Each structure stands twice: as structure tokens, then as C-alpha cells.
Image (cartoon, helix red, strand yellow):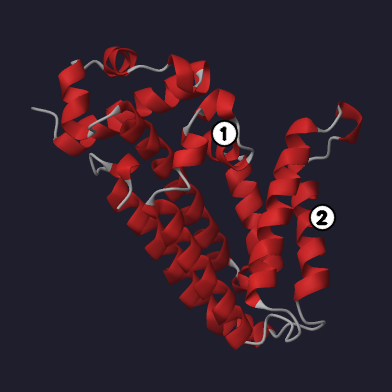
Amino acid sequence: MPENKSARADRILDAAADLLLRWGYRRVTIDEVAKRAGVGKGTVYLHWRSREALLMAVLLRESVGMFTAVAEHVRRDPDQVRLSALMSALYLESSARPLVLALYTKDTETLGTLVQTSSGTQVQGVKLVTFEEYYHLLREHGLLRADVSNDEVSYACAAVLFGFFTMSQLAPAEFAQPREQEAGMLAGVLRARFEPPRPSKRAAEALAPKIVSLLEDLATQYHELIYRPDISEGG
């Protein structure tokens, strides 16, 4: 039975992801990906117009898995909707995916120019809009302190996440912490600065389905971009 187009595309993505992790951006070629996937070079170009588009699709697929997993955290436990808890889950799920981790730590050895181009496409815009809505909904449900702005929250979350990701990669061995403990410390920083002293469990329960939907919508939008032949060109 002939292989369908979607299954073939996923096999190519599997091969590209494996090579990206093993060899890094500079050494991965369409020829090598095609060979690893067991297809012709022209077949790869039928799915993605360039090497950059293919490798961007690999990152998108990893991000889909990460955001879907974070949504599942909230589905299982509505209290995970709080800023500190959701960012902690985001940290753990990103850390479990080497290519997502490489993106957060600006690892140019692994990702090369994808570190820059990933923020220049509509991918970043979709993500920013999603998290702006998340912060707005937290505030609407009384789960953020009234004396901090959404811009402050957005900046601090990015700074704290990047800081913890970087520290986990660069810190001397004697400072190394278990990933779960790092996530707990990250949550503590955000909780102390941005959450009210007694967050309402009822508010979290009411908000949780909306945040699950928001994250799943983000994952869906990313998934739709994966199979676009020209994703690296933005638009």
C-alpha cells in the first residue's frame, strides 16, 4: 500500500530532527535527510522549499508537543492555570525536548540561524498573541496582582525562563539542581512578584478550560504551519 503524503512528511521530519540533534545545523543537508528518511532529494523539496523551511518545521513540531503537554497539565489540575504553575510546566516540558531547549538557550551550534529566523516568522507573532491573551485572562479572573502591568508580567516571564534555561546549561556542576527543583524555584520567583497572596481556586477552576483551549489553539496553528512549504519565509 503506497505511503500517504502526511506519513512521508513525518518520516522526513523524524530524520531531520535526528540529524539536527546529532550533527547540528551546519552539517545537516537535504541530501543527508533524504538518505536517512529513505526518499529522494526531490521528494523532500516537494514538502518544503528549502533546508531552512524543513528545519523550521522540525522546531514547530517539537513546539506543538510542548504546548499540548502544558495544556494537559492544566486539564489534569486547574490550579496549574496560575502564572507560576504554568510557567513551571512550560519550563519542564521545554527542558524535556532538546530542540526546544536549544531554541530557548540560543544554541547556535545545534540550531544555527534558526535561532534568529524563528523569531522573524509569524510563528513568534502567534505565540505572543496567545500569551498576551493568557495574561489578560489571568487579570480578568483576579489571578494577577493589580499593581503590575501585563507588559511587566510578559517581560519578567521571558527573563526568568531564559535565565533558568541558561543557568541550567552553563552553571558549574556543583550548582546543578534537579530539573523539578529548578522549576519550583522559578515558580516561587513568579508567585512572589505577580500573584495575589491567596489566589482563588474557584477562579482557577473557571479559567482552566479557557486556557486549555487557548494552548490547544496555539498548538493547532503551529501544526498547520509545519506542512507549509515556505514557513521559513514568514507571512
Q: Nearer the viewer, residue 76 or 133?
A: 133
Horizontal and vertical percent for residue 217? 38, 64
Give the Cα distance between marks 2 and 1. Answer: 21 Å
Drawn side of residue 196 relative to residue 128, left or right: right
Residue 8 visible (yes or no): yes
- Residue 173, relative to residue 57: is it above or below? above
Which quarter of the figure is the N terminus placed in? Answer: top left
The residue under the point 60% across, 43% down is: 104
Horizontal and vertical percent for residue 65? 45, 47
Residue 82 visible (yes or no): no
Lower sequence index among marks 2 and 1? 1
Circle 1 sits on which residue? Answer: 98
Horizontal and vertical percent for residue 156? 71, 62
Q: Residues within 10 Å of mark 1 (few under 14, many from 20)?
A: few
- Residue 170, relative to residue 180: is it above or below? above
Circle 2 sits on which residue? Answer: 185
The residue under the point 28% across, 52% down is: 224
Drawn side of residue 38 relative to residue 115, left or right: left
Tag 1: amino acid: Pro
The residue under the point 48% across, 76% down is: 209
The residue under the point 61% across, 87% down is: 141
The image quarter in which residue 106 lies: top right
Q: Secondary structure at mark 1?
A: helix
Labels 2 and 1 touching (C-beta < 8 A): no
**Residue furthest out toward the right:** 174
